[in-house]
Image: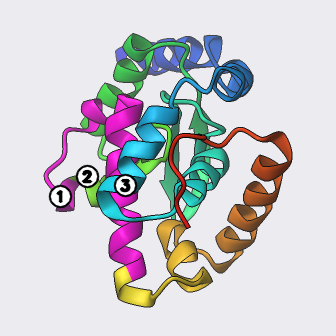
Amino acid sequence: MKRIKSLLFIIFFIISFYNKDIYAESAIQKHQYNYCFEQAAMRYGVNVKLLYAIAKVESDFNPYAINVNANGRSIKEYYPENKYQAKMVLDYLLSHGYNFDVGIAQINIVNIKRWGLDPYSLLDPCYNLDVSARLLKNLIDRYGLNWQAIWHYNGRPSYAYKVYHALIWLQNHDIYATSYRNP
């Protein structure tokens, strides 16, 4: 009975701040993470526009987005309003052994463990984008600069199509960083 009450409390708490669009418009309009995108792209030599597209597809630019996976599929998305709420969700997922993605570029727990990363640190968008660029660089080195490398970021061939459409959307909305030109 106590376990059911605590589970209901967690579900109620999480549902109370479920709002996917809270960061989407403000992050795009204010260009608040341009520096992070630019620095990550420069550090690993990846295309900055590709990083923007991945963040658009993965979290719609929400630095606190968390996605739970099962059997290779997304089963639940969380959009906490702040870092504190996101940490509470991470606490629960970590303590129960869930497979999840975290942050603006949705870094998966498999990569977090493989690289010995702190999942809470990935709530920092600059750090998350740095890890994302590192992962993307590894995939490009492995598969070449092609759509196969892109879809391996997420694990599904259809992902490359989503990233392609995000690139078009981003170009039409002119949100790319302007101080860094990356081919």
**Secondary structure category for the residue under label 2:** helix
Residue sitting at x 47%, y 43%? 37
Point out residue 44 in the picture as x, y percentages from the top left corner: 32, 61
Give x and y (percent) for residue 133: 39, 57
Depth check, mark 3 against mark 1: the one in front is 3
Tell me where residue 132 sits by quadrant.
Answer: bottom left
172 above or below 66?
Answer: below
**Most distant residue in the left direction:** 116
The answer to whether residue 50 is above or below residue 94 is below
In the figure, is residue 112 to the left or right of 42?
A: left
| Circles 2, 1 touching at the beta carbon (< 8 Å) | yes
Image mark for residue 115: 1
Q: Is residue 90 visible?
A: yes
Mark whose residue sits in front, 2 or 3: 3
Query: Cα distance, mark 2 to mark 3?
Result: 22 Å
Q: Position of residue 161 (x, y in %)?
A: 75, 71
Question: Disc 3 and disc 1: Cα gap in Å?
Answer: 21 Å
- Amino acid at pointer 1: Trp
> Which mark is drawn over residue 112?
2
Residue 114 magenta-drawn?
yes
Quadrant where the N terminus is found in the figure: top left
- Mark 2: few/some/many CA within 10 Å (<14, 14-19, 20+): some
Which image quarter: residue 150?
Answer: bottom right
Task: Specify the segment rendered in magenta.
Answer: 113-140
Residue that appears at 86% across and 48% down: 172
The secondary structure making up most of the magenta span is helix
Residue sitting at x 38%, y 12%:
84
The residue that label 3 is drawn on is 42
Q: Are marks 3 and 1 in contact (CB under 8 Å)?
A: no
Using the image as rendered, state which of residue 32 and residue 157 is in the foreground. Answer: 32
Q: Earlier in the sequence, mark 3 or mark 1?
A: 3
